[in-house]
Amino acid sequence: MNPKDQELIPTAEDYSLLTDLYQLTMTACYSGEGLAQKPASFELFARRLPNGFGYLIAMGLAQVLDYLEQFRFSPQALDALKETGIFQGAPEQFWSLLAEASFTGDVWAVPEGTAIFANEPFLRVDAPLWQAQIVETYLLNTINYQTLIATKAARLRDVAGAEATLLEFGTRRAFSPQASLWAARAAIAAGLDGTSNVLAALKLGCQPQGTMAHALVMAITAVSGSEQDAFTAFYRYFPNAPLLIDTYDTVAAAKSLAQRIAAGEIQVTGVRLDSGDLVTLSQKVRSHLPNVSIFASGDLDEYEIARLKQAGACIDGYGLGTRLVTGNPVNGVYKLVEIDGIPTMKQSSSKITYPGRKQIYRQFHQDTVIKDRLGLMSESCQDHEQPLLEQVIKQGQRLKLPESLDVIQKRTAASVASLATSTRQLHQPTPLPVEISDALQQLTIATSKR
């Protein structure tokens, strides 16, 4: 093995191999059985919402489109597959398919930042069977994870309010370096103001955000003799950055800073609290530093922010890390719904799927969502309905330029605002009712009897 390969940092050239083995073994089987080029449709959806969620915010489509545009198997990738010995019995057509691979199908998807519900497709892939099959793993990876982060970020913004500063601090807790980048993107697109992840911020065209760590305060205090010396040193180089004041005695630090501000020795724009009773401490800090923004961090989530606000905490902004970038996953699945014009469905117990190519028809009353109707693509919109799935790739070509995070963020805010309070509430939310159209019900019955 090449030592460089053990870095396990994928590049675009690796994306075709960033998949599960069975995608490739099925492709080999399709090739041998003459099925590989049959037109097929797969839909990606969640059977149920994560516990405690009333909705999901669709996210990750941009990375799906990038992946499909770059879908190729390099000569090195083909050699690596052959060296495994697994594909010794694969037909020659299999290797020809991979050698000439590019995505030539169509993709329909809901725009990023759209609220959706159980059994509603995030996207549909219409393509030759082998192409639609082999891309499953990567699509699920990016959609599932970014949708989880986006949904949490949207809930955080909804609870904290429009005026609060919300920053993504989860890089050290994300499940991988790649996940940290996707988490930062999804969080900002769904309503957060920035990220501490420098690489993510620069790639996304944002200004990195952050403060300081306890280590700096402890190091300078140990060498120079006081916590205030640490504040002075940091202020010297970063005069507009918040100061972390809870390393030793939070209230004493606030009092000393207030005295120095009054004496004209230092100007403080903000302070951060990372531990302790945030309600009591923030109130006491505010009494000493009435004109200074107070920022809080430390295992916070939407439930804790709601509690802090209700208890009267004096907090202007929050850093969100562990509980934002980890948690109960979005268990999205990717299922075949049609092959060569024949509707298909899974009939396993508790895992039944709906057949046929579908559309989500959303009904509004003024600006409020009333219900969704899951129907077939061939159906027409009823009164006050809007179709949610839009075509984004046609015959392998992207139809639209990538959207900015600002556009997606505004769509997220509008989508959440359109939902009923009972759907948005944190405790025992009620998801929007999803009606199954008559045509889809009839197709389901007919398909189940085949």
Image: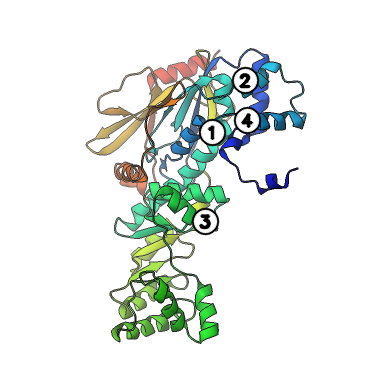
Q: Is residue 51 above or below residue 385?
A: below
- Amino acid type assigned to the residue bearing label 1 in the image: Val
Tag 4 or tag 2, which sits nearer the N-term?
Answer: 4
Q: Residue at x 46, y 16 (%)?
A: 443
Looking at the image, which residue is at 40% across and 76% down? Answer: 236
How far, Cα to Cα, is label 4 from label 1? 28 Å
* x, y percent for residue 341: 50, 13
Q: Secondary structure at mark 4?
A: loop
**Which one is in front in this view, the residue at disc 1 or the one at disc 3?**
3
Dots 4 and 1: beta carbons under 8 Å?
Answer: no
Which badge, 2 or 3, comes first in the chain's sequence?
2
Which of 129 and 287 lies nearest the eye of the viewer?
129
Please identify, in this view, whether the residue under mark 2 or under mark 4 is nearer the observer: 4
Q: Quadrant of residue 18?
A: top right
- With 9 as the anchor, is 182 left or right in this view? left
Q: CA distance from mark 1 to mark 3?
A: 26 Å
| 420 vs 274: above or below | above
Q: Which mark is residue 74?
A: 4
Is residue 171 visible in the rendered image? The answer is: yes
Regarding mark 1 in the picture, which secondary structure is present there? Answer: strand
Q: CA distance from mark 1 to mark 2?
A: 25 Å
2 and 4 marks in contact (CB < 8 Å): no
Label 2, label 3: how many angstroms apart (C-alpha)? Answer: 39 Å
Which mark is nearer the camera, 2 or 3?
Answer: 2
Q: Which residue is mark 3?
A: 171
Q: Which residue is mark 1?
A: 333
**Badge 3: residue crowd in 10 Å (few <14, some 14–19, many ≥20):** many
Question: Which quarter of the figure is the C terminus placed in?
Answer: top right
Distance of label 2 from label 4 (alpha carbons): 12 Å
